[in-house]
Image: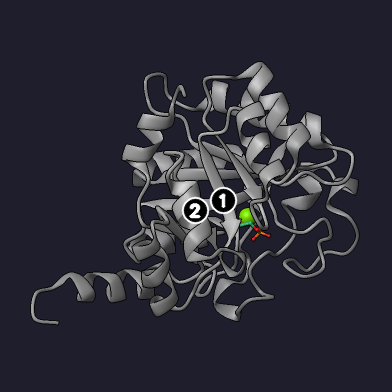
């Protein structure tokens, strides 16, 4: 499948989940910078739309958990969202951290030479327009000739939209447990990767999935022992809130005599 070889070669064992989100507020530029400092080469972030259709980083449909705002993300324009504090909820050290746009995120990842997994996380009813806006941002702000970020989603309609409008952009299907139906969906959407819940995979299942040649990514694993076991089973990448800890543990394991 087009793009599969390239993504297989590019993927790393560790992907920082929402940035280094155990040590910095998730889905912020600070968390992405910290992921780089902790030695990650890949970062996963969640993308949704402001009311005025600008791509921003945010996991929840509501503002309450990760900002000092209230209400639904989709009810606010970008200029209102960018006045919010997206760092204080996590720690006073991050007070004043803003909700980043996807454009700012792409710029930072290019500057830091980080690979990117963009998870399209549409607010209800916005699956199509969110996917189209992500494609448009990438076309506008991603340098020609540089491999595209990996676009993943639980939202089949979003992945379908990317497949239709940007077939050249590599896609990954997010799924809890990979059932037969899910695996058929991978083919239909021409996805190059499968991203599944680490709690719901077995050794046998990973073996069967890996045998199809598609890289398997597992979320969200913060325990180094569990991460190592999954990698040994054939999982390609571990999506973790603690890229630094996992990296230290995996590197220590590789040193002779340890
Ligand atoms: O992309 C992997 C993981 O982020 C999916 O779940 O809820 O953390 O976005 P969630
Ligand atoms: Mg995510």
User: Which residue bears the numbered disc 2?
Assistant: 217
Residue 180 position in % (x across, y down): 67, 45
Q: Residues within 10 Å of mark 2 (few under 14, many from 20)?
A: many
Q: Nearer the viewer, residue 31 or 197?
A: 197
What number of labels is visible?
A: 2
Horizontal relation, residue 222 to residue 7: left or right: right
Residue 62 seen in the current view: yes
Ligand 1 neighbours mark 1 (CB distance < 8 Å) = yes
* Of the image marks 1 and 2, the number of the one nearer the N terminus: 1
Residue 26 position in % (x across, y down): 60, 64
Ligand 1 neighbours mark 2 (CB distance < 8 Å) = yes
Q: Determine contact: label 1, label 2, CB under 8 Å.
A: yes
User: Which residue bears the numbered disc 1?
Assistant: 195
- At numbered mark 1, what does the secondary structure look like: helix, strand or loop? strand
> Image quarter for residue 225?
bottom left
Residue 101 seen in the current view: no
């Amino acid at each position: 499948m087009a793009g599969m070889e390239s993504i297989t070669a590019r993927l790393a064992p560790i992907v920082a989940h929402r940035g280094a989100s155990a040590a910095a507020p998730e889905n912020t530029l600070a968390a992405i910078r910290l992921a780089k400092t902790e030695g990650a080469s890949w970062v996963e972030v969640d993308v949704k739309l402001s009311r005025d259709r600008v791509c921003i980083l945010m996991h929840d449909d509501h503002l309450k958990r990760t900002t000092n705002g209230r209400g639904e993300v989709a009810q606010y324009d970008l200029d209102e969202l960018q006045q919010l504090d997206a760092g204080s909820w996590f720690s006073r050290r991050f007070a004043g951290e803003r909700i980043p746009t996807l454009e700012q995120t792409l710029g930072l990842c290019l500057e830091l030479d980080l690979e990117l997994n963009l998870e399209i996380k549409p607010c209800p009813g916005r699956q199509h327009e969110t996917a189209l806006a992500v494609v448009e941002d990438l076309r506008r702000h991603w340098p020609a000739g540089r491999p595209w970020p990996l676009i993943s989603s639980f939202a089949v309609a979003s992945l379908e939209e990317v497949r239709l409008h940007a077939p050249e952009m590599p896609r990954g299907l997010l799924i809890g447990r990979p059932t037969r139906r899910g695996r058929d969906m991978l083919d239909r959407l021409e996805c190059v990767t499968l991203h599944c819940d680490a709690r719901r995979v077995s050794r046998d299942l990973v073996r069967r999935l890996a045998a199809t040649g598609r890289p398997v990514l597992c979320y969200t694993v913060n325990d180094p022992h569990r991460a190592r076991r999954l990698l040994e089973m054939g999982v390609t990448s571990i999506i973790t809130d603690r890229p630094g800890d996992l990296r230290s543990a995996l590197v220590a394991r590789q040193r002779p005599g340890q």
